[in-house]
Image (spheres, rainbow, N blue to C red):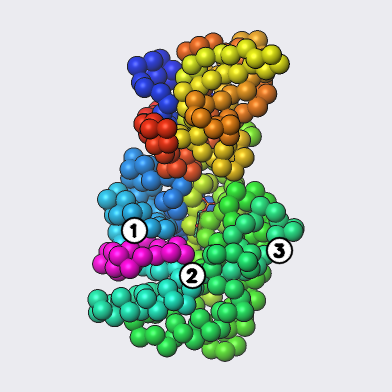
Amino acid sequence: MARFPIAEFKDLGTPFYFYDLALLDRTLAEIKRTSRDERFKVHYAVKANANPGILRRIQAAGLGIDAVSGGEIAAAIEAGFRGSQIVYAGVGKTDAEIELAIRNGVSCFNVESAPELEIIDEIAGRMRKKANIALRVNPNIDAHTHEYITTGLAENKFGINLGQLPDMIRLAQELEHVNLSGLHFHIGSQITETEPFIMLCETINKLQEQYAENGITFKTINVGGGLGIDYADPDRHPIPDFENYFKVFRNHLHLRADQELHFELGRSVVAQCGSLITRVLYVKEGESKRFAIVDAGMTDLIRPALYNAHHRIENISSPNGELHHYDVVGPICESSDCFGKDELLPSIRRGDFLALRSAGAYGEIMASHYNCRQLPGSYFFEK
Ligand SMILES: *Cc1c(COP(=O)(O)O)cnc(C)c1O
């Protein structure tokens, strides 16, 4: 069990996000160590967590940014990132967002459709700029072998299908105010096996060979994010296996000498450094079940309700009590507002603090005001 400074929690309003900055720093250092290669550029996917304290830390470590909205571009600039460190993706960019991105000099638009490409060209022309673009390709990696891959399939709102790519490349070459600089891929999230990434490399190799024969080369290849983390045992794997992850691309992707390889990691950077801390309001004895009703709900951490995800739950106030089964539930008026069923936990009393682990990614950033609730606060731990 991770150690929490519980004495300091007594005066804080719950629920709140607890961020272990020392772990974040170690994670960032490990990314730096294992991605060492002049041609590798690691971007942080802001959508995982845009807390300014976290963003500034990531900025200081020298990572770039993957943004999916104008708001994220603004948050990154506010945290000290330069526009040239930002790549901008998203299937539905508005005109105002495209203008904001060009004004801030983002290094690349990841483009997902022909009409989007034409609008970027038009707006860039109006602003007397030339926009760097990469085409987001749908590699159609087989979902039957890899069920967890949900964004790289043909029938999906994201990206451009392989069959439509030649036309898109032609269009990008014809337009005057865009510069086709690369290809972009993102095959899914929470991928804990190596094989899908190997398949991605092989797909890219084939594509590159095919286009090279026609005299078309790309300055950048962007392989997106998706590296998974250990939700079941965060203390055993506090830092994901970045060594193996980057090795896969080093060994399987045929990069040309002058080519850059971009990564967009979200979850794997920030998930393990965050926990949602909540206080137990009531222990309710049902006829066949015992409920621990806590003051955090799906408005603070929606992943269990939204994706059926499970976060490890710990009783950090009394870790050594007798074990009992509890359903750990929130106060929101929805049956899906449940963090765990039949959780085996040390005896819980009213007022105990529980920690929902591995909540640093897609946690705080997805919080809502549903039921007119306040957003959770955040607490940074440095030691
Ligand atoms: C969400 C997203 C990422 C980050 O995904 P993780 O699974 O959190 O690493 C990267 N690139 C794109 C385009 C995304 O949409």
Residue depicted at 59% across the width and 69% down the height: 138
Residue 181 point in image, percent of width and height = 44, 76
Q: Three-letter amino acid code at disc 1?
A: Gly
SS state under label 3: loop
Q: Position of residue 288 (x, y in %)?
A: 71, 16
Q: Which residue is mark 2?
A: 112
Mark 1 or mark 3, which is nearer the start of the sequence?
1
Whichever of labels 1 and 2 marks the residue nearer the N terminus, that label is 1
**Marks 3,2: beta carbons within 8 A:** no
> Residue 70 has which mark?
1
How many tags in the picture?
Answer: 3
| Residue 249 visible in rendering | no
Q: Residue at x 27, y 50 (%)?
A: 78
- In space, the residues marked 1 and 2 are separated at their CA atoms by 16 Å
Which residues make up the magenta segment? 86-105
Q: Residue at x 70, y 54 (%)?
A: 147
The reply to whether dot 1 and dot 2 touch (C-beta < 8 Å) is no
Query: In the image, is residue 273 above or below residue 121?
Result: above
Quadrant assignment for the C terminus = top left
Identified at 47% across, 39% down, the residue is 363
The magenta stretch spans residue 2:
no
